[in-house]
Image (spheres, helix red, strand yellow):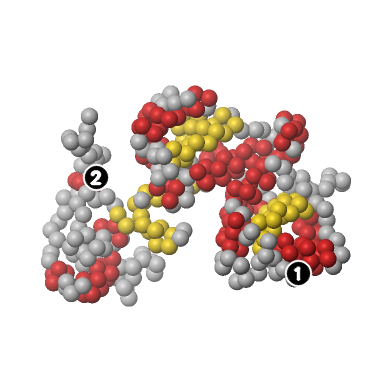
């Protein structure tokens, strides 16, 4: 547990969070390498099943980072994403998982600092929650999937 | 369409607890449209069930199949090979689908994963409301296209009861008084005289009062 380095999947919208990550890079603001970014054309593209599959395959935490409310390039993709995240959280709660492993975050393309801060905070939160319970089983039974 | 909602996870988990190999079947018809048991929901439920097992240090083998229609024997026949490998079947179709599968594969344990709700129409994305009770004797032709059987809480046939208040039903402010709606629409259509026509006491046998119903079309039946 002490050396636990979580694997975090971040679905980042091309028009905001992904550019914010770029901005963080340009400004030389570092953020934890635990966060693996998946660029999506809009967070509206992220379906509940993508988040579930990430957890199933061993991600310790997943967040979806979309545009600020009302600023979606495609009108309401971020709102849809937020609803889907809430649905996954409900699923997790129902099966006794910590719903905090999944989160929706909003930011604009200029918020490089916020991107880095979010990555830090989320990584810390997941470190406190501990590893995805799936990993323990998969290590022993299905190593190919870890 | 027939509407449904997924059952609470704990209920589903309890059903499948004794089994390690599950066949999870969805349906491409009504439950897909009301987002309760289509291919997407099958994927999500399978994933959630696997996560639940993994949390307890076990694995679950789930095969996902979504049939074109689960209430028709010819589509249910498609399960014939996949079903052999499964210890039990979990169906995300309405009650009709679950029963069709159970009747065809009578040596398999079949469990429902959704609660079938009502025959409804979509009001907006993600919102469905009851619009028909299948009473077997449609009276929409005389009630301006608004059904008092399904939309009046008491299924009154001759105007509102004393519980109507400001156009809403006494059961709650979210429910319109069906007879207020009927009156307003009759007025808008210039058909007020229809409101005066008395509807006689109904024969509720076609509504299910005479037991389970069946339709036999001699011209189609083989």
Residue B190 position in % (x across, y down)? 18, 74
Q: CA distance from mark 1 to mark 2?
A: 62 Å
Residue B15 visible? The answer is no
Chain letter for mark 1, please: A
B89 displayed left or right of A91: left
Q: Nearer the viewer, mark 1 or mark 2?
A: 1
Q: Is A131 or A79 nearer to us in this picture?
A: A79
The residue that mark 1 highlights is: A111
Q: Is A23 or A50 nearer to us in this picture?
A: A23
Quarter location, residue A146: top right
Residue B13 position in % (x across, y down)? 56, 39
Query: Which quadrant does the C terminus of chain B fall into?
Result: top left
Residue B169 position in % (x across, y down)? 33, 67
The residue that mark 2 highlights is: B208
Count of numbered circles on the image: 2
Q: Is B138 above or below relative to B105?
A: below
Quarter location, residue B141: bottom left
Neighbourhood count class around disc 1 (C-alpha, 10 Å): few under 14, some 14–19, many 20 upward: some
Residue at the spot x=87%, y=46% of the render?
Answer: A3
Chain letter for mark 2, please: B
Residue at the spot x=20%, y=58% of the render?
Answer: B139
């Amino acid at each position: 547990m002490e050396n636990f380095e979580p694997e975090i999947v971040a679905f980042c919208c091309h028009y905001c969070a992904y550019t914010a990550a770029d901005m963080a890079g340009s400004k030389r603001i570092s953020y934890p390498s635990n966060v693996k970014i998946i660029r999506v054309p809009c967070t509206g593209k992220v379906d509940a099943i993508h988040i579930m599959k990430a957890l199933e395959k061993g991600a310790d935490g997943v967040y979806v980072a979309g545009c600020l409310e009302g600023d979606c390039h495609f009108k309401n993709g971020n709102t849809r994403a937020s609803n889907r995240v809430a649905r996954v959280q409900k699923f997790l709660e129902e099966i006794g998982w910590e719903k905090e492993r999944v989160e929706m975050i909003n930011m604009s393309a200029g918020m490089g600092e916020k991107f880095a801060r979010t990555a830090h905070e989320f990584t810390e939160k997941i470190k406190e929650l501990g590893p995805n319970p799936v990993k323990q089983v998969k290590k022993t039974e299905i190593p190919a999937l870890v | 369409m027939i509407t449904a909602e997924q059952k609470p996870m704990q209920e589903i988990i309890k059903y499948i607890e004794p089994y390690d190999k599950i066949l999870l079947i969805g349906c491409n018809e009504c439950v897909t449209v009301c987002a309760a048991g289509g291919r997407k929901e099958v994927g999500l439920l399978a994933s959630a069930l696997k996560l639940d097992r993994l949390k307890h240090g076990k694995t679950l083998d789930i095969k996902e199949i979504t049939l074109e229609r689960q209430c028709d024997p010819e589509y249910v026949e498609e399960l014939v090979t996949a079903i052999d490998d499964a210890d039990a079947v979990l169906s995300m179709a309405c009650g009709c689908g679950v029963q069709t599968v159970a009747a065809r594969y009578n040596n398999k344990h079949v469990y429902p994963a959704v609660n079938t709700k009502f025959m409804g129409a979509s009001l907006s994305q993600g919102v469905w409301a009851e619009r028909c009770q299948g009473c077997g004797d449609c009276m929409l032709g005389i009630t301006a296209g608004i059904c008092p059987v399904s939309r009046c809480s008491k299924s009154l046939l001759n105007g509102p009861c004393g519980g109507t208040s400001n156009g809403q039903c006494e059961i709650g402010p979210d429910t319109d008084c069906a007879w207020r709606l009927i009156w307003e629409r009759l007025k808008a259509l210039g058909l007020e005289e229809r409101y005066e026509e008395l509807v006689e006491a109904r024969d509720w046998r076609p509504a299910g009062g005479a037991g389970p119903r069946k339709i036999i079309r001699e011209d189609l039946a083989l």
